[in-house]
Amino acid sequence: MTLEKIATRAFPAFAVGFALYYAPAYSFTGANSAFSWPLFTYFPAIDRWNWALVPGNDNIGPPMWWYGWIVSAVIVGLIFAVIAMLLPERATAKMWSVLVWVVPIVAFVFLANWELVWFFPTWKPL
Amino acid sequence: MITALLIIHGVIAVFLIGAITHQTLGTFWPRRPGQVDFVANARGIRPQVYVDTIIILYIVTFFIGAFLYPTYRVYVRPPLQDLQLTYAIGLFEIKENFAAIGLATLPSYWWFWKKTNEYPTTRKALTAIFFGIIWYNFIAGHILNNVRGFT
């Protein structure tokens, strides 16, 4: 299988899968989330790593979920890439060439809905 | 160590800003024959020449930023919360989200610019996305770095 056959579908599919997971992961992660969006949690104040979502407290300091979201999203992106390789090339290449830039833009808009609360404290995500 | 890395992070970001701006100008507003002024020269480049440079600079900037992030989380963000400067935290949140999704889009960006002549719309769209990400992250980073001067 040539690089072209892989890249035209797998690279865009990876980006699409990553964005489709990352945006809700950021938006729906909270101390009481039912689903562990980040694969792991890092506590920078005490340099400790924990599997899955762990909330912070006064003893262990603030949690960092960003690394965990990225690794989780990479896994989802790779799954998308594998699925894309199983689909017919001719029928899907054009679709991936559009989704690769449309989905990140949609993800940014989706994220903005949740990020606005930092600028407007009374903002309620739609 | 952290301060030195933060300065390196900012300096590499300057190179990245230059590269993506040249590429964006050359892509969306190419120089026409006969134009020789300063701005036309900035536009008169072959956009594909910048792809590898942009990718390398983006990755280096990203990983230095990722290394610096814990320091921000422990020493910078709590005082911002105490001072109720939530807009500054929001600027950083957007920055981290842009950076992550941009990183995942880099392989496609490389492919559509370097390895295929098809899909010109995709090339333009990806360039525009990276232009927005890189400029936003550069400005937001500087505002955060100087945030006490804004209070």
Image: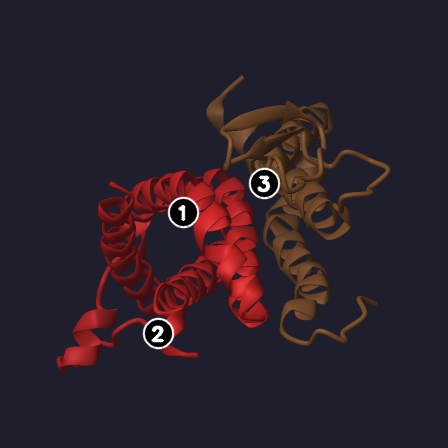
Chain colours: A brown, B red
How crowded pointer 1 is (Cα within 10 Å; few <14, some 14-19, many 20+) is rated as: many
Q: Nearer the viewer, residue B7 or B149?
A: B149
List x then y, in percent, for residue A61.
59, 40
Q: Which numbered disc flags the more N-terminal residue, 2 or 1?
A: 2
Residue B49 relative to residue B143: left or right: left
Label 3 element class: loop
Q: Amino acid at mark 2?
A: Trp
Q: Nearer the viewer, residue B65 or A21?
A: B65
Q: Quadrant of residue A22?
A: top right
List x then y, in percent, for residue B109.
46, 46
Residue B130 relative to residue B146: left or right: right
Residue B74 relative to residue B67: left or right: right
Q: Are marks 3 and 1 on the same chain?
A: no
Identify the residue at horizontal 39%, vertical 43% (top origin).
B68
Quadrant of the drawing holding the N terminus of chain B: top left
Identify the residue at horizontal 44%, vertical 51% (top origin).
B75
Q: Amino acid at mark 3?
A: Gly
Q: Give the Cα distance between marks 2 and 1.
A: 17 Å
Q: Which residue is mark 1?
A: B113
Q: Residue furthest top?
A: A1
Quadrant of the drawing holding the C terminus of chain B: bottom left
Q: Are marks 3 and 2 on the same chain?
A: no
List x then y, in percent, for residue A36.
77, 33
Label 2 element class: loop
Q: Which residue is mark 2?
A: B29
Q: Which residue is mark 3?
A: A61
Residue A117, numbered label: none
Q: Can the viewer see residue B96 in this picture?
A: yes
Identify the residue at horizontal 57%, vertical 52% (top origin).
B97
Q: Nearer the viewer, residue B53 or A126?
A: A126
